[in-house]
Amino acid sequence: MPLRIEDYALIGDCQTAALVGKDGSIDWLCLPRFDSDAVFAALLGGPENGRWQIAPAVPVRAVRRRYLGDTLVLETVFETDGGAVAVTDFMPVRETVPVVVRIVEGRRGTVPVRMELVIRFDYGAVVPWVQKADGGIAAVAGPDAVRLRTPAPTHGEDLTTVAEFTVAGGERVPFVLTWHRSYDPTPEAIDPEAALRDTLSWWQEWSARCPYDGTRRDLVVRSMITLKALTYMPSGGIVAAPTTSLPEHVGGVRNWDYRYCWLRDATLTLLALLNCGYTDEAGAWQEWLLRAVAGDPSRLQIMYGVGGERRLDEYEVGWLPGYEGSRPVRVGNAAHAQFQLDVYGEVADALHHARLAGLKPAPAGWALEKALIRFVEDAWDEPDEGIWEVRGPRRHFTHSKVMAWVALDRAVKSAERFGLDAPLDRWRPLRQAIHDRVCREGFDPGLNSFVQSFGSNLLDASLLLIPLVGFLPPDDPRVRGTVAAVERHLVRDGFVLRYDTAKTDDGLPPGEGAFLPCTFWLADNYALIGEREKARELFDRLAGLCNDVGLLSEEYDPRTGRQVGNFPQAFSHIGLLDTATNLFHPDRCPVNQRRES
């Protein structure tokens, strides 16, 4: 049986990332970038689709794991009848090519260990040519080449590279896997122990800059480390998750590729970085954002590649059976071509807060923003696909109109506060007109709540963002009514659904887990309206979903009690960061700063 999603941990080098299971198997790794083809794809199939397992060759009685301090270096300890052995996994922060290091250490007694390396390029489809090389093996197929170096003797079994050895207490056996382009020279060998020291030092220095000292600092720092791990360092872009096609409903078709950079994550990512003192990362993210959105405002996309790429064509990988049979497995994301009005508000909000934080203004940044606002002036009254990227008909989504208001509001405030040239005589009345229409057509007096789209009687968790972005104050009766309506109609077993998939035409069969950021938004609303005990209770429930190493996926299925969706999910960790600071460190709270900007 495959591992549960929460049974995985993350390692990475700030350009790609791997998922390591409790069984000692790396089941997912794309090289050399987050969005490259996978060399280990067992996560979406089986061992034959590529994996790298190191574990005791005898029955394991117990497994425990942890990150070594505030780093991305993972330690997994296996207890057996004959002793204990630890496997330390990490990826050195990249200088040239990606490297995965695994160090096996005897902790107690004597333990036989087996290593199985199944290299499969192109998402498990391509079996490489493997031959012996000095200190290990070399594998090559097309443009890809992998080199394994280890002092442990290796041999081949059924298209698998195997090593069998025994470790006693105090013994250490390293394995170093290096990827390179097949037509480039083989990279020089690295010292695995020196690389471990350098990697520990790098992450410890980075995480020590986080100033948060409130309750659950462990999860806050782990969330910051996770966001950093999901950063593509060469460009500054941040991927939504390092995986594709982990299902929102096990066995279903809601399986999407999240290895791209979503604009709507921009504001809260930027605020989280700024509030924790990571101005370099925030500046790099702002530069990525401006490069990505440059051009014709009517062609603004909701997501881009890690380098700012625009073509993210979606196709199905038919030879992979999917996680627990959840087909299809998708690469690329067709939603990149959707019209989603809210992203204009997200971009304007991000740029406004960058100015408030004193980030160096980008050349032509204001001219670009004015061009985006000109488009909003013409397009705000058009239907769109909305925040949830529905593949059904376009509608006048209430949240989309709220974010159109945010776009005008932040542009007006930036112009007023920083003396920027702007047609305020047009922007101010349009901002009010959008606000008036949302309150008139997006609110249902019978439900005493804002609704999913104009004229609808359905609820949507995105409505919880209305007070969080400052559209209305938290104590407005319409906000309180919306919170109550969400509680009645969208809360299942204590968690918030995005919307009712059985009633909303989103172009897909019904059924999915609870989208975790929505539940964090409900906790934020509780805190803002003064119900702090309810907020704390809900936060504790969400914090309890984190796996043993502090990671969250996209969704949670209360029915089966397991994490679902792509993993780990940046948006979920942003929600954890925001709600924790809202509750325990309100002077640094991104939600409050966004609402009061």
Image (cartoon, rainbow, N blue to C red):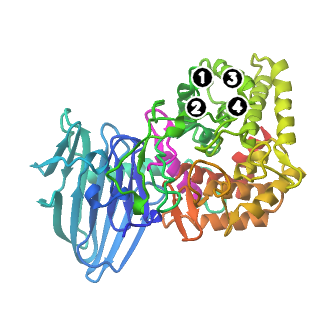
The answer to whether residue 11 is left or right of residue 428 is left
The residue type indicated by label 1 comes to Ala
Query: Which residue in the protein does label 2 denote?
Result: 286
**Kind of element beneath mark 1:** loop
Query: Where is 501 relative to 238, above or below?
Result: below
| C-alpha span from label 3 to label 1 | 21 Å
Splitting the image into 4 quarters, where does residue 323 fall? bottom left
Any part of residue 212 in sight: no
Any part of residue 524 in sight: yes
Query: Where is 242 relative to 82, above or below?
Result: above
Instruction: Choose the circle earlier in sequence order: 3 or 2.
Output: 2
Query: Alpha-carbon neighbours of circle 4 within 10 Å: few (<14), some, or many (≥20)?
Result: many
Task: Residue at 41% x, 63% y: name it.
Answer: 324
Q: Are marks 1 and 2 in contact (CB under 8 Å)?
A: yes
Query: Which residue in the protein does label 3 denote?
Result: 375
Task: Residue at 19% x, 41% y: name it.
Answer: 141
| C-alpha span from label 3 to label 2 | 21 Å
Q: Is residue 225 covered in magenta?
A: yes
Splitting the image into 4 quarters, where does residue 53 fall? bottom left
Residue 352: which disc?
A: 4
| C-alpha span from label 1 to label 4 | 12 Å
Task: Residue at 55% x, 34% y: name it.
Answer: 285
Q: Position of residue 91 (x, y in %)?
A: 35, 50
**Kind of element beneath mark 3:** helix
Q: Are marks 4 and 2 in contact (CB under 8 Å)?
A: no
The residue type indicated by label 3 comes to Phe
